[in-house]
Image (cartoon, helix red, strand yellow):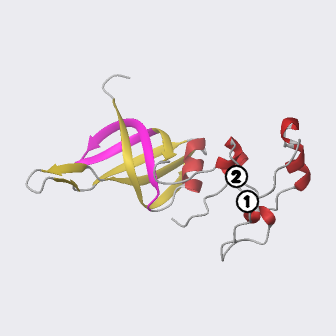
Amino acid sequence: MSGETAAVVRGRVYGTVQLRHTERGTPAARFTVMQVPREYDRARGQWRDGDPVPVICTVTGPLARHVAECLTDAVHVIATGNVAVRDNVLYLDSAQVGVDLAQHVAYVDDTLPAVLAGRAPDPALRAAATPAHRAGPTRPAPAARPAPASAPGTDWWRTTPRSTWDAVTAPSRTRR
């Protein structure tokens, strides 16, 4: 299609996501992203936030259901799609929408840690997932860290962080 301008919008969701269905039953979602441009103030010699620019984003199909389920007010997102200006309002017909990982931690259904999903980790699966080369001699465990005040009653919080890649799926213990 000619005449369309592709754009990337990065900002925060403003308000709630509206989910509706077309006459044929196709889901369609609409939400507003507030993009705040950074501007250099030469008089002060520093960067500052510019005037917020609201961008109305629309998505259809399975993406609309995912957006309606995942996005809430003030979540940082990155959206790409075709942009149009109508009546001095920016509209983005979004092709892709994602959570801005520079601002948030996001989990995919398959990678959600058991503790965050509300289920206790299965010890049999944990033992089966341990590679054979790691089952050799064990080293003494370092002193256990105290559990946070709001920690769930599982042994997950008391385990020592590992220096392998699977440690990145564990939630952060620091408060944000």
First along the sequence among labels 1 and 2: 2
Q: Main secondary structure of the magenta part?
A: strand
Identity, as a three-letter code, of the amino acid under mark 1: Ala
Identify the residue at image location x=78%, y=72%: 153
Asked if residue 118 is positioned above or below residue 130 in the image, the reply reads below
Say if residue 22 shows up in the picture.
no
Q: Which residue is mark 1?
A: 117
Q: Are marks 1 and 2 in contact (CB under 8 Å)?
A: yes
Identify the residue at image location x=70%, y=52%: 112
Position of residue 150 in the picture relative to residue 133 (left or right): left
Residue 18 percent coordinates (x, y): 49, 57
Q: Residues within 10 Å of mark 1 (few under 14, many from 20)?
A: few
Residue 80 percent coordinates (x, y): 42, 38
Residue 151's quadrant in the figure? bottom right
Q: Which residue is mark 2?
A: 112
Asked if residue 94 is positioned above or below residue 89 in the image, the reply reads above
Q: Which residues are magenta?
A: 74-94
Say if residue 6 shows up in the picture.
yes
Q: Nearer the viewer, residue 163 or 98?
A: 163
